[in-house]
Amino acid sequence: MNVPVTSFSEDQAEAFDRLAEAFRSAGVDIEESMTTPRTEGQQGVMAVIGKAGSGKTMLLARLAEALSDAGVDTISGDYDGRRRKDRRTVAILAPTNKAASVLRTRGVPAATIHRILYTPLYDPEYERIAEWLVGNADRPEVEGLTDAALDRAFAFYQQAKSVPGALAAAGLKGSDFILGWKRREDPLDIGFVDEASMLDKRQFEDLKEIFPTLVLFGDPAQLAPVNQSGSMVFEDLPAPRKLTLSRVHRQDLDNPILDLAHALADETLTFEGFERMIEDASTADDRVVVASRVEAGMMARSPVLVWRNATRIRLIHAFRRAYDAPEDSLLPGEPLICDGIELPLKHRKKRLDLEARGLIKGAQVIYLGAGRKPGFSRLHVIGAPDPQVSAASIVKIELPDEEEPFIPFAANMGAAFLHGAAVTIHKAQGSQWPEVQVFAPDLYAASRAGRTEAGLPLWKRLAYVAITRAETRLHWVTRYRLGKPAEPLTTSDLEAPAALLTLTAEDTTE
């Protein structure tokens, strides 16, 4: 076996062995690092569940490495390659761009669920280049492209493993080589889904159609999708198909944020008792901060997390006032949240073009400035592999105590956005930021309301999700006050990469 199981805990090693056994029916033997004939007609869903710090991501990464060593092709979502009878495939998925980017920063080649459900249609001439890049064909000769351009494409692919990025490095626009998008028809072999607590039942059914072997990695202590009565899709699986990781790993033991998260499992813990634990942690470790106000500067890149929509809207307006943002326009650097694509059914292809660029509902976006055409915006999509895009935009800024939002500008149709300086804890699931501000008065209100979800006090689920969004530092904000920013908004931290995919919404929605 190529995977060093000695670094596994006992529960991880057991899960690894159980999954290895399941993969054999998909035609993959990761213990012998080889592929075998696929057994048709078998379908199985398994779940690896555990709380924060239990090693789910570590196990996922080791499994992905073992599959790669066995000769399994990882499907990235930007190019599949031509199907071969003996080919075995795996796709590593996450529900959001941000969750996928967290995996990619850990060396795991992840894509969003949407990028696997829908595949790009390549122009046959440029598909020859793609086949060469992925190792399925000889170097082609393509009219209009020099040897130097092909060399640039090859060098880019060796570094980034992105076919669209490589073609962009050769000087091509996305509209040159991608003709459109279609729903995937051919099944793949194995699918991993991280942050599976966010899956709704429709997505789950879609994924089961594509993957005969599907493995869900989820945290049962998080919040279930809205409209699912507090349940997660993996909860209904039979017990033998649920693999539980209970051990918190050594590298996480000295983490006060995880200590606080796991303390919420104590049935006797009250909200007041939890706040005392946070205060004690803040005096012993600077990774936990008790703050008397929200810091506006931090909200520009990591939203403050709240429970109530009314709180979210008030904090957004406080943020905009702190930066002297005009009422009728946005400042470059303001954060937005994609609220969906507002296009009629006849423009389904245009919708897929936008979603394939990362503008899926819930995507975090930074406004860079006005586009070349009225109603268009230049945007940076956080966590997307090719983050910079120009899109027809409908920006809605909600107002306190009013049903209708204020719309500073809007195209006739396109991507809709809400302001992103503050988000609800539900919307924050699947995302992580280096530093996170949690608005404690909202969690106190949830505790006073006495609500429960799936048998647990709602405030505890909210607190668990909110504090585990912080990678390195948690700010527990105790009062409704806002600290003014020390510097103006900027976009200098969002410089475009050297080779941008130039397929834009301006090419596809006009």
Image (spheres, grey):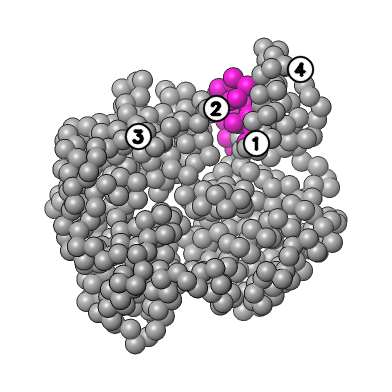
Residue displayed at 26% across by 66% down: 290
Name the image quarter holding the N terminus: bottom right
User: Mark 3 is on which residue type?
Assistant: Thr
Write the start and end of the magenta stretch as one range.
162-184
Q: Position of residue 319 (x, y in %)?
A: 21, 46
Classify residue 295 as left or right of residue 434: left
In the orientation shown, which residue stands out farthest toward the left? 401
Name the image quarter holding the C terminus: top left
| Residues marked 3 and 4 touching at CB (< 8 Å) | no
Estimate the spatial distance between the alpha carbons at disc 3 and disc 4, rounded to whole Å.
40 Å
First in residue order: circle 4 vs circle 2: 4
Estimate the spatial distance between the alpha carbons at disc 4 and disc 2, rounded to whole Å.
22 Å
> Which residue has dot 4 on it?
141
User: Mark 2 is on which residue type?
Assistant: Ala
Q: Position of residue 31 (x, y in %)?
A: 81, 64
> Which residue has dot 1 on it?
159
Classify residue 432 as left or right of residue 276: right
> Which residue has dot 2 on it?
499
| Residues marked 3 and 1 touching at CB (< 8 Å) | no
In the orientation shown, which residue stands out farthest toward the top? 144
Nearer to me, 100 or 256: 256
